[in-house]
Image (cartoon, coloured by chain):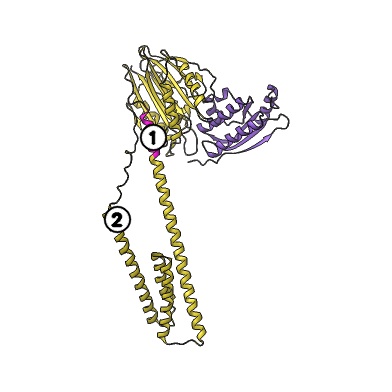
Amino acid sequence: VTDASARPRAEQPGPQQAAPSPGAGAAFLESGSRRSGALLRWIVSAALLVAAFAADHLTGSEVSSSLYYVIAIAYAAWFLGRLAGLGMALLCALAWLEAYTLAGMPFSHPAILLWNVFAEVSIYAAIALALSFVRNHVAQVRALADRLADANRLLDREALAVGRLQRELLPGSLPRIPGYEWSVHYETCTRAGGDYYDFTTLPDGRIGILLADASGHGAPAAVLMAMTRTLLHTTTEHSPTPDRVLGRLNREMGRLLPPGWFVTACFAILDPSSGSLEYSLAGHLPPILLRARTGSPERLPASGGPLLGPFSQVTYDSARTHLERGDALILYTDGLTEAEDPEGRLLGEDAVASALVSAPSLQPGAIRARVLDCVVRHRAGVAASDDLTLLILAREA
Amino acid sequence: MVHRSALQWQTTMDAATGVRIYRLNGALTDSEESYSFLANARDEMSADPRPLLLDLGEVEHVTSAGVGIVAAVYKAAADAKRAIALARLSRRNEIILEVVQVLRFIAAFEDERAALEGYAEAGWARGA
């Protein structure tokens, strides 16, 4: 997730290979195994019937025998199906009649015997039908759960693939600027993310830095991020300024994006030799500048304009600042300041600034660790609900 | 994790000004309900263009997707040359909309009455 020098990689391993389909031998073995399993179940059913009959006979006609037979019927209905269950119900009724006949205790009227046989058959058949009905429903629910799990795996594989592609769009490495040091943290709240950072080296040696955040998260945000990258890299300007770059991105996005979608961005141009930094914001949170001289964080003015896309006719402003030796610039997306605690409270810019007090002497990696520690403590175990990117550029003292 | 209720809304017409008021309740996010609200607002605007007022007083949570929905309603209103305003923003939602600079384009009022008075003063009422 955190990467100080190179493109963050997907945490998950590569695409899952499809399981090899069983060959003919395996299929034969499997079907043989199924056949022997069914035969065993028939044998167990027959054994239970015999046992029930024996128990009925041995315990005599005074002891109720229904439970012995119900066990045999339940087994047959559950493991062999409805027809087997009904067949077993009939056999059990006959066995009951036979046991009663062997006991030699006649009923006072022949019609009572007929009624009792009818009642036994009906009760046994009802049990067989009910159990086979439940079994079928259980099987259907299991099949449905399997299909849902398969669909979920497929969706997850697709989301992983989108995430991997999206991460490939991030720079493979951070630009090497003598006298400066970077640190980056990139974290998505789902498989794919909508945060995006990139760099361009201008012909005069200045470095363009973009940090953008597409609305929403997941695959749709990743698509927006890819669009932003394409538009950024199709510039034809030889000497761009941050406000002009954002103005052009805004016009293009206004033309391309469907209603409800937008991108926020901060575009900055650094002159490494002087430390001069010009930046513009498009509905994005202002960067924080850690002044080595004062030892305190400074929120840069929110110069720029609205988010990219919905307001296509606007122009953007730029502002300038200067990175002195030892200063550090922190760009971030709203996943930082809008991190939520268990009660839904936002972390906020003030808490981030507080975490950075007395941090100017730190290396960029240590600044990053301090900010992330602040986020983790605020979240207190709550899962991230938005992507979070931190881009820290420090000028060596 | 904080439980957030799905977005619901009611529409009403202010008889004096002719402003259509949407009273939103719940979370304005990337939910199906939020996009249904956007579709509904756009459809009603194209069928019967009137000034709009979004009362967000009962909206407990606005995500970036929710900001996009507010911006899209604004754009639809602007395309239809209709006025739009917000009322009863919580401090949290106000900060979120301020950061993305949406409030540069959409006026925000303390409550519905102030918004309707603002419409009347600006001459935006009655679908003007």
- How far apart are the alpha carbons under marks 1 and 2? 37 Å
**Where does the image place residue A167, in percent across and percent down from the top left?**
37, 31
The answer to whether A57 appears left or right of A119 in the picture is: left
Query: Among the chains, which one is yellow?
Result: A
Q: Does dot 2 land on a helix, a strand or a loop?
A: helix
What is the residue that sits farthest to the left in this orientation?
Answer: A25
Amino acid type, residue under disc 2 in the picture: Ala
Displayed quadrant of residue A197: top left
**Where does the image place residue A302, in percent across and percent down from the top left?**
50, 20
Q: Residue at x 58, y 26 (%)?
A: B75
Q: Nearer the viewer, residue A87 or A365?
A: A87
The answer to whether A8 appears left or right of A315 in the picture is: left
User: The C terminus of chain A is located in which quarter?
Assistant: top left
**Where does the image place residue A221, in percent across and percent down from the top left?**
45, 32
Q: Which residues are magenta?
A: A158-172
As drawn, the label of residue A27 is: 2
**Where does the image place residue A209, in percent across and percent down from the top left?**
40, 20
Q: Nearer the viewer, residue A358 or A116?
A: A116
**Is A202 inside the magenta-drawn segment?**
no
Q: Residue at x 47, y 75 (%)?
A: A121
Label 1 packing within 10 angstroms: few (<14), some (14-19), many (20+): many
Q: Colour of chain B?
A: purple
Q: Does dot 1 land on a helix, a strand or a loop?
A: helix
As drawn, the label of residue A163 is: 1
Q: Is residue A208 above or below residue A8?
A: above
Q: Is residue B26 above or below residue B100?
A: below
Chain containing mark 1: A
Q: Nearer the viewer, mark 1 or mark 2?
A: 2
Chain containing mark 2: A
As drawn, the label of residue A11 is: none
Q: Nearer the N terminus, badge 1 or badge 2?
A: 2
Amino acid type, residue under disc 1 in the picture: Gly
